[in-house]
């Protein structure tokens, strides 16, 4: 039987989140957890992942549940498991047990959400007499990702619940902004869970390095890495990238054979059972020894990674960290003879983005790319919007850092054919790229180095620091 192992301090921490929300909004809130999608028949589903906004206030991945938050109180709506469910899934906790585990003040079946009768006089016999057609007008929500539940939300509200944050308005927008302001920085409960996820991811990356020399295809290294996550009863926080073709930024193919001269790029991380994520990338030589060209470029990327982490401090603009990475990479490529010209001019003209075409990182929390279901509401400070510049368009975070935020720092170097063979770009940057020199680095397709960094009052703490980044230490881990 599934057990609910909850401590009072956990319930207090969840209650504190609800009280912080109540201090920000003066209207009730309904949040849906979502439900799993069938693969073919109803009981054969894709893995369920509860909505992160729901998880933030309940701490439990309940399926097909709704919470109503008001003045720091929580009312849970969910159905008891059917008698047939015990046959297939075993005994599950009752609604009241779950309510106790999340510190709910009241708990009702889902059908109560649809009650249309609100009559003060009849309220005595049932504590929860509601009139959706009236009170839903004043109750805010956030559109859930899962389409079936989203349809339920729209039916209940009798209006479309927009998921495109650029179009939401009124109290739904106020709620989204309040949730962003709460989830931007992390409390002790969240940090403890983020650390758990980071610890398992570090073991997974070490297992991947150790498995490389005996692996024939990428899938075998992926299996060694994800095996660690599964053995810890966790899930992957996103689809793992484990590839010798790191120039494909989100490469989700694992069938390439592995050659001794290749670099292996692994971007994967665990998600704790509570939903909190980690996101680590390392790049290592399949042979256990970087070639001199691989090592030169690895050290350029590492210099950018280290410079950004050293600069992290409350008040620092994340965009400036991106530009610091850009400058460091441009300077390194000038030293190697790949780029030429002044570093300032190369950054000004976005020439570095030929080789580093993404942002230096993003928020991390209950999701990798935390809160990107809300578009750029979380990533971009109010009044700012995405630049259309080649070097800045994929910048996912443009805010001053605050103590308690967790961000990734993930600079990279890639030789992306679609960029480097693009005639318009080739002619625009003809005068600053030494293409003959670049050709000497053909054994580098993609390098990325990524860590998860907590902003502290005095600087930063790298949550993933126990996994080395130094080239020699990486080689040692591969050689075993
Ligand atoms: N871990 C994948 C990404 O940050 O986009
Ligand atoms: Mn990342």
Image: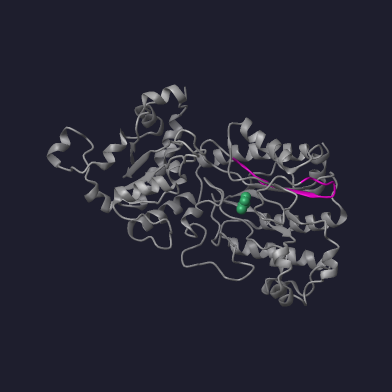
Q: How is the image coloured?
A: one colour
Residue drawn at x 47%, y 41% as measured from the top left:
37
Instruction: Tell me where residue 27 appears, x and y as whole percent.
Output: 30, 51
Q: Is residue 385 above or below residue 50?
A: below
Displayed quadrant of residue 104 = top left
Residue drawn at x 76%, y 76% as measured from the top left:
430
Instruction: Tell me where residue 412 appears, x and y as whole percent.
Output: 71, 57
Q: Total number of numbered labels?
A: 0
Residue drawn at x 78%, y 39% as measured from the top left:
215
Residue 399 located within the stretch drawn in magenta: no
Residue drawn at x 64%, y 37% as measured from the top left:
199
**Could one spot residue 90 in this view of the protein?**
no
Q: Is residue 327 above or below residue 128?
A: below
Displayed quadrant of residue 54 = top left
- 260 or 367, which lies in front? 260
- 180 or 132, which lies in front? 132
**Could one spot residue 407 in this view of the protein?**
yes
* Left or right, residue 370 beside residue 284: left
- 353 or 20, which lies in front? 353
Image quarter where the C terminus lies is top right
Residue 259 located within the stretch drawn in magenta: yes
Displayed quadrant of residue 17 = top left
Chain part drawn in magenta = 257-270
Instruction: Tell me where residue 248 appears, x and y as whole percent.
Output: 69, 56
- 83 or 442, which lies in front? 83
Instruction: Tell me where residue 68 appears, x and y as whole percent.
Output: 33, 43
């Amino acid at each position: 039987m599934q057990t609910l192992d909850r401590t009072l301090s956990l319930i207090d921490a969840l209650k504190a989140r609800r009280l912080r929300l109540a201090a920000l909004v003066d209207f009730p809130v309904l949040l849906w957890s979502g439900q799993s999608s069938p693969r073919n028949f109803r009981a054969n589903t894709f893995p369920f992942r509860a909505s992160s906004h729901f998880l933030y206030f309940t701490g439990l991945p309940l399926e097909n549940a709704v919470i109503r938050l008001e003045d720091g109180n929580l009312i849970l709506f969910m159905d008891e498991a059917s008698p047939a469910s015990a046959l297939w899934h075993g005994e599950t906790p009752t609604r009241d047990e779950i309510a106790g585990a999340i510190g709910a003040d009241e708990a009702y079946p889902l059908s109560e959400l649809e009650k249309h009768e609100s009559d003060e006089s009849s309220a005595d016999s049932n504590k929860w007499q509601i009139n959706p057609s009236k009170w839903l007008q004043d109750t805010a929500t956030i559109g859930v990702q899962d389409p079936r539940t989203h349809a339920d939300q729209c039916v209940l509200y009798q209006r479309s619940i927009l998921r495109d944050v650029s179009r939401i308005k009124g109290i739904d927008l106020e709620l989204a902004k309040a949730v962003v302001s709460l989830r931007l920085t992390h409390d002790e409960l969240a940090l403890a869970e983020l650390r758990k996820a980071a610890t398992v991811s570090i073991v997974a990356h070490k297992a991947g390095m150790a498995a490389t020399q005996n692996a024939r295809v990428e899938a075998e290294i992926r299996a060694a890495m994800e095996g660690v996550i599964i053995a810890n009863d966790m899930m992957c926080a996103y689809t793992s990238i484990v590839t010798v073709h790191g120039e494909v930024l989100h490469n989700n193919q694992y069938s390439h054979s592995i050659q001794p001269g290749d670099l292996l790029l692994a971007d994967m991380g665990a998600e704790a059972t509570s939903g909190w994520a980690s996101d680590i990338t390392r790049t290592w030589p399949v042979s256990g020894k970087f070639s001199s060209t691989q090592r030169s470029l690895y050290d350029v990327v590492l210099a950018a990674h280290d410079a950004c982490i050293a600069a992290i401090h409350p008040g620092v603009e994340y965009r400036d960290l991106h530009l610091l990475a850009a400058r460091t990479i441009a300077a390194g490529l000038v030293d190697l003879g790949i780029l030429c010209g002044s570093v300032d001019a190369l950054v000004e003209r976005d020439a570095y983005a030929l080789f580093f075409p993404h942002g230096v990182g993003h928020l991390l929390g209950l999701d990798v790319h935390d809160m990107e279901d809300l578009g750029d509401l979380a990533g971009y400070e109010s009044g700012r919007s995405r630049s259309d510049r080649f070097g800045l368009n994929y910048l996912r975070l443009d805010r001053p850092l605050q103590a308690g935020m967790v961000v990734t720092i993930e600079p990279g170097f890639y030789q992306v054919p679609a960029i480097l063979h693009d005639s318009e770009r080739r002619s625009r940057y003809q005068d600053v790229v030494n293409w003959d020199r670049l050709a000497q680095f053909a054994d580098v397709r993609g390098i990325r180095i990524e860590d998860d960094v907590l902003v502290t009052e005095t600087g930063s703490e790298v949550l993933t620091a126990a996994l080395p980044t130094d080239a020699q230490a990486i080689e040692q881990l591969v050689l075993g």
